[in-house]
Amino acid sequence: AQKVTQAQTEISVVEKEDVTLDCVYETRDTTYYLFWYKQPPSGELVFLIRRNSFDEQNEISGRYSWNFQKSTSSFNFTITASQVVDSAVYFCALSENRDDKIIFGKGTRLHILP
Amino acid sequence: NAGVTQTPKFRILKIGQSMTLQCAQDMNHNYMYWYRQDPGMGLKLIYYSVGAGITDKGEVPNGYNVSRSTTEDFPLRLELAAPSQTSVYFCASSYRLPSGRYGYTFGSGTRLTVV
């Protein structure tokens, strides 16, 4: 069965520090998709990235970077030089090829302190 | 394109009342989903649909019903509201191309309180 674990429930860092959010997943499929979403205090879900299981290249987008490692079933998310606006709940999610439904982790609440 | 539209945005129900949460998408996506997010928690899948006329249960389907008579609409029905159904409900849709490309779009959510 598919499962996403975000072991960090809540993290607080001081502005400008780097922070890494961990995500470990379980799946029986060889083809699957991994996602990160941001949920700011306003409540909407903001799509950040989708990665398919065949593409293990790390991705960088501005201050955001993602490290996908199939060997450890992890898809970690790093924010460099964090800003107060990064404060939000971040969700890692998994979708298997067989049916497309996304299963979410429980989320990590990130506090960036000024 | 409006994307995924959910109505209402907020609702207060009394225990035992019924209501339908509406979800519509104008992107011609085949797949649609309903999630609930309890306070401080992640999203849990209630029901999903892979196309008009086809629906299936997710992780937490009890107390809910869905229908998918058209590609555009995927309403979620609560028959006998209970306090445990107090939550934020998100509708989503997705598409898949033969090449494997696909994307998800989420609605802005419906905040439901049952008192």
Image (cartoon, coloured by chain):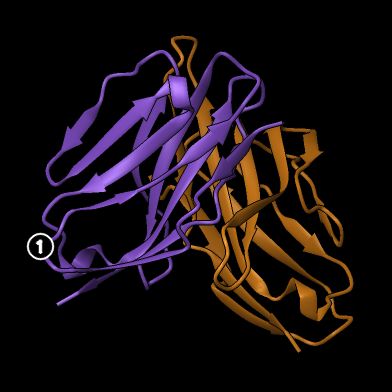
Question: As drawn, which residue projects farthest toward the top?
Answer: B99
For image coordinates 50% across by 52% down, the residue present is A7
Dividing the image into 4 quarters, which one contains the C terminus of chain B?
Answer: bottom right
Q: Is residue B104 above or below residue B35?
A: above
The residue carrying mark 1 is A16
Secondary structure of residue under mark 1: loop
For image coordinates 24% across by 62% down, the residue present is A86
Q: Position of residue A2 (x, y in %)?
A: 65, 33
Residue A70: which quarter of the image?
top left
For image coordinates 75% across by 44% down, the residue present is B58
Query: How dense is the environment of label 1, judged by Cα within 10 Å: few (below 14), some, or many (20 and up)?
Result: some
Q: Position of residue B114 (x, y in %)?
A: 74, 83
* Chain containing the residue with disc 1: A
Residue B71: which quarter of the image?
top right
Q: Position of residue B103 (x, y in %)?
A: 43, 32
Specify the colour of chain A: purple
Tell which chain the image draws in orange.
B
Q: Position of residue B106 (x, y in %)?
A: 48, 50
For image coordinates 38% across by 44% down, the residue present is B1
